[in-house]
Amino acid sequence: MTRTSFITIAVIAICVIFAGNVRAHPPWSIAVDRSGQIYFSDLETIWRIDVQGKLSVLRAGVRGRHTHELTIDADGNLYGEDLRYEPATQRFISALWKITPAGDFEYILAPTDSPPKGMSIWKDRSGNMYSVAQPGGSREALILKRTTDGKIIALSGDSRAVDEVQPGVLYSDGMALAPDGSLYIRTGVDTRRVTMDGAITILPRSPVGFAVDAQGNIFGADYVDRRIIKRTPDGKETILLHTPSPWRPAGVALKDSALYVLELRLPFWGALDGARVLKRSSDGTVTVLAALREGKQVPAHISLADTDNWNAIRSERSTLYLIGAGIIALTVAVWYLYRVRFKPRKP
């Protein structure tokens, strides 16, 4: 066995170890309006749970058209973004849309493969838009503010890099509007609080989806470690909820004293095949409000432990580590036997 072969096998083993954590961008879109209606995306379809608990389709899904995040304004209008890949042109098509409380649909930005720089569904009270962009080279990610007259301002990062930003997808890596008007923006490695006057505070944790209450507490979905974490303004963290495999928390929303969580079903070695919405009441009680499997509703009383065959795998990550470690150990043993024990010696 050559050194190249050994390295190749070792690389394959490492890929096996981390394969279970390599996922496409999930939806982290869940929002609650003033009346208590809940909206969420399973990536393609937009669903609504009304105040009586009835689940219905608000916007039918189209295969390949993805909606990653949602937000609601003070008037109850629901905003979302679309993304799809066009094979004929090998380009991504993006759009922004709005659905009114009456159910009327309209595009804010019609589908295009060249969206204007700085467009997003996230606005402050003055109508300015916020987004995160990655300029070319090794430059730091930029937090962009697009004013109502179309001017682009870099709130963080090298402002000289604004011209290098190319139009791309219109969803963020995670964003939330706080009751005080400030925005919390995930930049990949951390989360940043941006006030209306542009002041920025860097926070250490970087959840996928999150929400902020009037006291400045952050409720974040730890997608990797399957937890919902509350972080107070003084930095104290509390785990509010654990999610068992094959579910992962992705989105979080607040309404009064209740916490609403969007979870995605990601089986061992599999792709996203389900979603559900949990409600955590102020007393810590957790209930399943709605559940989907392969785009169809299933009984909401599915237990938090899940009841399918994947429940036999108690720790997906540990299983992957054991498989990868076994492959590496076997490779080392074969290499040792070949090089030391059985390789013919030169006369």
Image: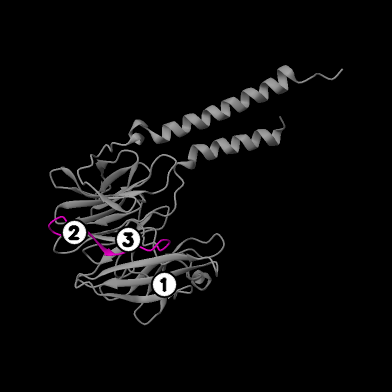
Magenta part of the chain? 49-65
* Amino acid type indicated by mark 1: Gly
Q: Residue at x 76, y 21 (%)?
A: 343
N-term mark: 3 or 2:
3
Q: Which residue does the numbered mark 1 point to in the structure image? A: 118
Q: Which residue does the numbered mark 3 point to in the structure image? A: 45
Reply above or below: 208 against 308.
below
317 or 202, nearer to the observer: 317
Q: Quadrant of the C terminus?
A: top right
Q: Which residue does the numbered mark 2 point to in the structure image? A: 214
Q: Residue at x 13, y 59 (%)?
A: 51
Disc 2 from disc 1: Cα separation:
27 Å
N-term mark: 2 or 1:
1
Q: Are marks 3 and 1 in contact (CB under 8 Å)?
A: no
Q: Is residue 186 magenta?
A: no
User: Which SS class for mark 1?
Assistant: loop
Q: Nearer the viewer, mark 2 or mark 1?
A: 1
User: Which SS class for mark 2?
Assistant: loop
